[in-house]
Image (spheres, helix red, strand yellow):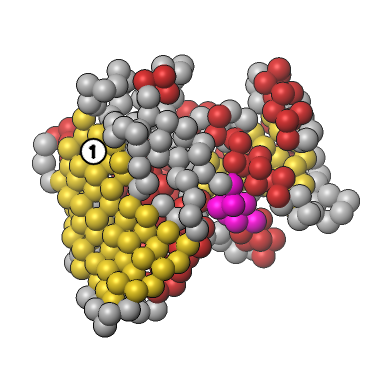
Amino acid sequence: MSDAQGRFGIGVIGAGMGAKPHALALQSLARDIAVLGVYRRDAAQRAAFCATYGFPEAESLETLLADPRLDALLVLTPPNARQSVVEAAAKAGKPVLLEKPVERTLQAAEQIVATADAAGVTLGVIFQHRFRRASRYLAQAVAENRYGPLEAVHLTVPWWRPQSYYDQPGRGTFAQDGGGVLLTQAIHSLDLMLSLCGDVTAVTAMARTTRLHQMETEDFVSAGLEFTNGAVGAVMATTASFPGGPESLTLNFAQASATLTAGNLTIHTMSGETITEGDATQGGGGADPMAFPFDWHAAQIAEFADAVKQGRQPVSTGHTALRVHRLIDAMTRSSAEGKRVVLTP
C-alpha cells in the first residue's frame, strides 16, 4: 500500500473531457497522493493525456489493480462503463471514487452500490459542490440549526449548452448518459440541496426537450418538491438558457434566508444581519462546461483519501448518491406519468 514516499496511491480509469479538473487536482495534491497510472482504451489519447499532466500510463485496469502500491481507483469513464470496473475493483478489495452519476439508471446505480457493499470496499462519488467554502459554511449553519426550521427551497440551474455539445457521439443519449440536464448537469445542485435540506418525499414535475436542441434526452425540467421535514420547494433546471448563468439555491428558514449562487453565499437574517461567504468563481453554466476551478475536486479527492486511510466513510458515498438518483428518477417518472410521485425510502 502507498508508494515509496508514503503517498496514497491512486489509479485513474478514463481520461475524457471531464478529466481535466481531476488531473489538475491530482497535480496539486502530488505531495500526498501519487498517480500510479492512467488507463484509457484509446492508446493515443491516453498517451497525450499523460504527457500533458505528467502522469504514467497504465496498460490496463488489471495492471493497476495488481500494483501493490494501489490504494484506490478514481473512475472517470462515461456512466455506461462503470459496473465492470467497480466489480473488478471490489474483487481486488480496492476502494473506488466515481465521477457522477453512479450509473445511467437508478437500478444500475443501486447495483453498483450493492457490489461495493457486498465486497466491503469504500465507494465515494464526486459531488464537488459540497466542498465549496460557501457550501461548507451553510452546511455547518444547518447542522447547528442556527436559523430555525427550513420552510421553503428554491433551486434554479439556468445553464446553456450549444448544439455542438450534444452533437458529440453519445452526448445527450440514454445509452451513454442515461439522461439530460438532470443526470448530467443539475445533479450537482440537486445533491447539494439534499445534503442541506434532507430527503424529498414527493415530486410533481415536467421534463421536456426544447426546440433549441436536437437531442434524445431532456434539456428543461421544472418541479415542485415536498420535503420530509415539511418544507416545500421548486426546481428549474435547463441547458437551454443562453448564454447561461450561475446555479442558485435559496433556503428560507424561520429566521433567515440563505442563497448560494455558484460558490458564493449570502445570508439575510430577520434581525438585520447580512453574512457573506465564498469565492468569486465561474461555475460551468455557459458554453464551456469546464469553466470552473479544480479546488473543489482537490478537496474531495483529499477527503476521500483521508477517509480510506482512517477507515471511515467519505462525505459523499454511494448511498448518499442514491438519494439524488432516486429524486431524479421520481422527477422523470412524474413527468412521464403526468402525476405526483411519492418517493420510497
Is residue 39 shown to the viewer in this render? yes
Q: Quadrant of residue 331?
A: top left
Q: Is residue 128 rendered to the left or right of residue 324?
A: right
User: Which element carries disc 1, helix, strand or loop?
Assistant: strand
Q: Is residue 332 rendered to the left or right of residue 266?
A: left
> At 77% across and 40% down in the image, what residue appears?
36
Closer-to-camera residue (90/294) = 294
* Residue 229 placement (x, y as % from top left): 24, 67
Closer-to-camera residue (268/294) = 268
> At 76% across and 55% down in the image, what residue appears?
32
Closer-to-camera residue (38/296) = 296
* Residue 268 placement (x, y as % from top left): 30, 72
Closer-to-camera residue (340/52) = 52
Q: Which residue is mark 1?
A: 221
Extreme-right residue of the structure:
4
Q: How would you rate the neighbour count of disc 1 (Cα within 10 Å): few for under 14, some for 14-19, many for 20 or more?
A: many
Give the magenta-colored segment's residue range: 294-302
Residue 296: within the magenta? yes
Given the image, on which type of amino acid does mark 1 rest?
Val
> At 67% across and 21% down in the image, what residue appears?
45
